[in-house]
Structure formats: structure tokens, C-alpha cells
Amino acid sequence: MIDRSLLMKAASWTPEQKALYTDLVDQLLRRNPRGRRLVAVEGRDGVGKTHFADALQVAFARAGVEAFRASADDFHRPQAFRYRQGRDSPKGYYEDAFDVELLDRVLLHPFRMGGSTGFVTRAFDLRADRAVEMEWETAGPDVVLIVDGVFLQRPALAGKWHAVVYLDADERTRGERMRARDGAHPDPRHESHRRYREAHDLYERAVNPRRKAAFIVDNSDWRRPVQVFADSC
């Protein structure tokens, strides 16, 4: 059942947001009009993944389709495991930060199975560095799951998604967003960002996520998002 309060959130959208979100959902529904559908929203830190994925949930509601939300950030591993290759290791961040197996086992796989199979949208509290009690949810046969996060097209998750939306934003914008959100240095090229920056470099060399994504969106101005077509990249 669609949460009617979601529809009210569209009232603050700009005309550009309304057009982009509506068109994107129309395209997603044309690609997969029925069944359990999984949509990934990924990109580098500060591109606005969570905000964008939340907006897609609203856009699906406006189209009469129930959509669930989850984030890869809620499937982190404990700190001791995350840093086992070193506190500043980019390779360690890419390989060890997220419990991809758990994400698939309790969320993606059971969601795709449908029926009465339960799924979990949150398993870890990153701030408290501890697992949380899993709350199992169920859904109808024709619903969408939107997951935001980094590295969502990694080999372990290949073939899991019906569609991937890859977000871009210019460095200055990403830096300012990270500063406002986390108090981080506003320049993504600063040494304090090296672990994460180089992990994304590693991922992009290995996977080329932009090329494999179904949709690419320039989200530098989140009030005026623009779809970038693959043949122009």
C-alpha cells in the first residue's frame, strides 16, 4: 500500500525535478512493468544518492507504484573488519567496508523471490558500530526496491538489479555537500579523502559503472537534475 504522505513531498519539487523524476520512473516502468523490481542509485560520495533515491520513491508513489527504500550504508561491517587492511587502505574500503553477502542474503534475494518471503532493509548501525535487530518486512507482488550506495555494480552484485541509476556531480559541489553533511574537507582531492577517492578509482577501473548503468544523471544542481544519455558520454 502506498504511503499517501509521500505524495505531499513532491510539492516542493522544482519543474526540472518533477520532469526528471517523472520521466525516469516512466522509463523504469516501461522496462519492467510488473513484478518485484530492484533499482540501484549509485555514484561517488557527495553526489546526492540518498536524496535522489528518496525522490524516486516519491515519484513511484505518484505513478501508483509502491516502492521500498534501503541503503548500503545500513549493511556496513564492524569497524575491526572494515580496517583489517589498514585504516587508510583504499582497497580495504572497497573490499571490506560493506557486508555484500548479507545485503544479498537478507534483502536483495528474498525481495526478488516475492511471495510471503520476508526481507530486511537495515542490518547495521554505523555510528554505534553494531548490528541492529533485523525487522522483517513483506510486500505485494508488484513493488519496487530502491537501494542507494557505493560500488553497487561490483562483481558480487552483478545481475542483481533491474536498472542502475548512476549519479554524477562536479567536485566542488560534492565537496561542499560532504562538508555540510560530515564536516569533511570541502576539496575531494584533499588527503583526508584519499582512502575513499582511490577506492572509487579502483572500482571504476574494474567495473566501469557509468557504461553499465541504465541511466546517468548529472545531479550537480539537485534542484535541476539532468539526464545524460550514454551515447554522449
Image (cartoon, rainbow, N blue to C red):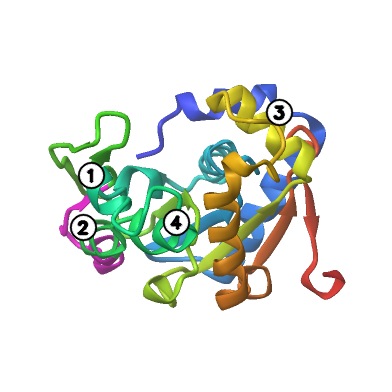
On screen, residue 85 versus residue 220, left or right, reads left
At label 3, the amino acid type is Trp
Question: Is 118 contained in the magenta span?
Answer: yes
The local secondary structure at tag 1 comes to: loop
Marks 2 and 1 in Cβ contact (< 8 Å): yes
Q: Closer to us: mark 1 or mark 3? A: 1
Quarter holding residue 173: top right
Give the residue number, with chain letter if any, for mark 4.
89
The local secondary structure at tag 2 comes to: helix
Give the residue number, with chain letter if any, for mark 3.
13
At label 1, the amino acid type is Ala
| Label total for image | 4
User: Which of the numbered marks, if any, corresponds to residue 123?
Assistant: 1
Are there few (<14), some (14-19), or many (20+) residues within 10 Å of tag 4?
Answer: some
Q: Closer to us: mark 4 or mark 1? A: 4
Q: Closer to us: mark 2 or mark 3? A: 2
Of callouts 4 and 1, the N-terminal one: 4
Quarter holding residue 113: bottom left
Q: Closer to us: mark 4 or mark 2? A: 4
The magenta segment is 109-120
C-alpha gap between disc 2 and disc 1? 9 Å
C-alpha gap between disc 4 and disc 2? 28 Å
